[in-house]
Image: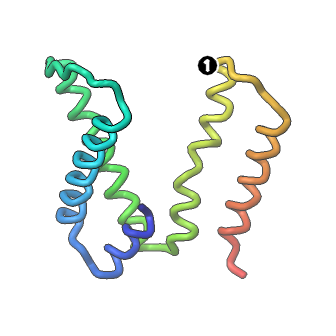
Amino acid sequence: MGIFYKVASIYEVSNESFLALNGICWIVFGIIYMSKFEKPININISSTVLKYSLLSGSLVCGIVLFMKLAVELGDASIVITISQLSFLVTFPGSIIFLKERFTLNKLMAIFIAVICIFIFSLEI
């Protein structure tokens, strides 16, 4: 997906058009995924669901916009890699809050990933 963000920035696609197209893709592919892989659900549009949907949609738009703006300023290989650092929070969070097992393999994977990100960021 990040590659498409970079292509859009190279061709100077407006942020508004890009967000609109991205939103349409999220909706269409979400419906396809839900109908193909999820159990049928009864969609009850309550005020809570509506508020959650608006908040979620706004956050996704923010992610998309800021990623596009970031790849306009830097190399996609570096910007996209660094933007995916959520695993550094997810790893300890899953151990603390979800009581997942802490293993040496998981620790080594985090260590290697951090080294890879550091190497990506070097100007050689």
Q: Residue at x 28, y 36 (%)?
A: 35
- Residue 51's x, y, as percent? 20, 26
In terms of depth relative to the viewer, which is nearer, 71 or 42? 42
Q: Is residue 46 left or right of residue 56?
A: left
In terms of depth relative to the viewer, which is nearer, 47 or 70? 47
Q: Quadrant of the N terminus?
A: bottom left
- Label tally: 1
Residue 102 falls in image quadrant: top right
Residue 36 falls in image quadrant: top left
Q: How is the image coloured?
A: rainbow
- Amino acid under disc 1: Phe
Q: Is residue 50 left or right of residue 117?
A: left
- Residue 3's x, y, as percent? 44, 69
Q: What residue occupies the far right of the structure in this picture?
A: 104
Q: Residue at x 59, y 49 (%)?
A: 85
Q: Is residue 99 left or right of residue 52?
A: right
**Dot 1: few (<14), some (14–19), or many (≥20) neighbours within 10 Å?**
few
- Residue 124's x, y, as percent? 72, 82
Q: Is residue 95 left or right of residue 37?
A: right
Q: Residue at x 28, y 44 (%)?
A: 32
| Disc 1 element | helix
For disc 1, the marked residue is 97
Q: Is residue 15 above or below residue 41?
A: below
Q: Is residue 26 above or below residue 96?
A: below
Q: What residue occupies the far front of the structure in this picture?
A: 36
